[in-house]
Image (cartoon, helix red, strand yellow):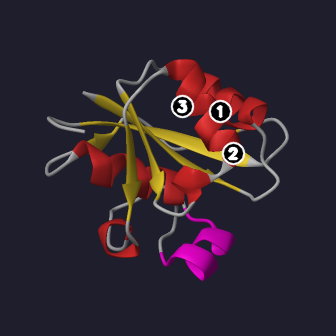
Amino acid sequence: MIVAGFGFRAGATAASLRDALERTGGVPDALATAADKARHPAFRALVRDLALPVTGLSPEHLRGQPTATRSTASLTHRATPSLAEAAALAAAGPGARLVGPRAVSADRMATCALATGASP
């Protein structure tokens, strides 16, 4: 199971999210982000396009995940060094590991990270 975790700014578009995903070089089986961001129109559009299951995660599930990168904005607003990496790890389940560090969209509006694990 490969989970793509996303972090993104309020002004991100579906194209921003897709670009970040494409920059990871992977093909996910599921998508994940913070619960409130899972309702964002751009994320919903990506979900419709990819037709993959989605996990919206609570702050409790995101905190404490061992991320490879660090974003001051993510730490300030989400209490995690990387929302994309934390979401991917949390949604992939116990024992999950990052495939690599997060990828950033060309417009710098979205990040995506992949994690492998046993369950979405």
Under mark 1, the amino acid is Ala
- Find the distance from the CA under tag 1 to the CA under tag 3: 5 Å
Mark 2: amino acid = Pro
- Magenta segment includes 75: yes
Residue beneath label 3, please? 47
Q: Is residue 19 left or right of residue 54?
A: right
* Numbered label attached to residue 41: 2
Residue at image position (57%, 53%) is 39
What crowding class fits label 3: few (fewer than 14 Cα within 10 Å), some (14-19), or many (20 or more)? some
Report the magenta residues as a range: 70-79
Q: Position of residue 87 (x, y in %)?
A: 41, 53
Residues 111 and 50: in front is 50
Crowd band around label 1 with a 10 angstrom C-alpha radius: few (<14), some (14–19), many (20+) = some
| Front residue (pair 80, 45) | 45
Q: Which residue is mark 1?
A: 45
Q: Is residue 81 visible?
A: yes
**Label 3 amino acid?**
Val
Identify the secondary structure beneath mark 1.
helix
Give the vertical position of 111 relative to 26 (above or below): below
Q: Are marks 2 and 1 in contact (CB under 8 Å)?
A: yes
The circle on residue 31 is none
Q: Secondary structure at mark 2?
A: helix
Q: In the shown orientation, is residue 65 left or right of residue 103? A: left
Tell me if residue 61 comes above or below residue 44 in the rendering: below
Check if mark 3's residue and mark 2's residue have beta carbons within 8 Å: no
Q: Are marks 1 and 3 in contact (CB under 8 Å)?
A: yes
Task: Estimate the x, y position of residue 118 in percent, counting from the top left.
Answer: 14, 35
In terms of secondary structure, what is the magenta stretch mainly?
helix
Q: Position of residue 33 (x, y in %)?
A: 48, 52
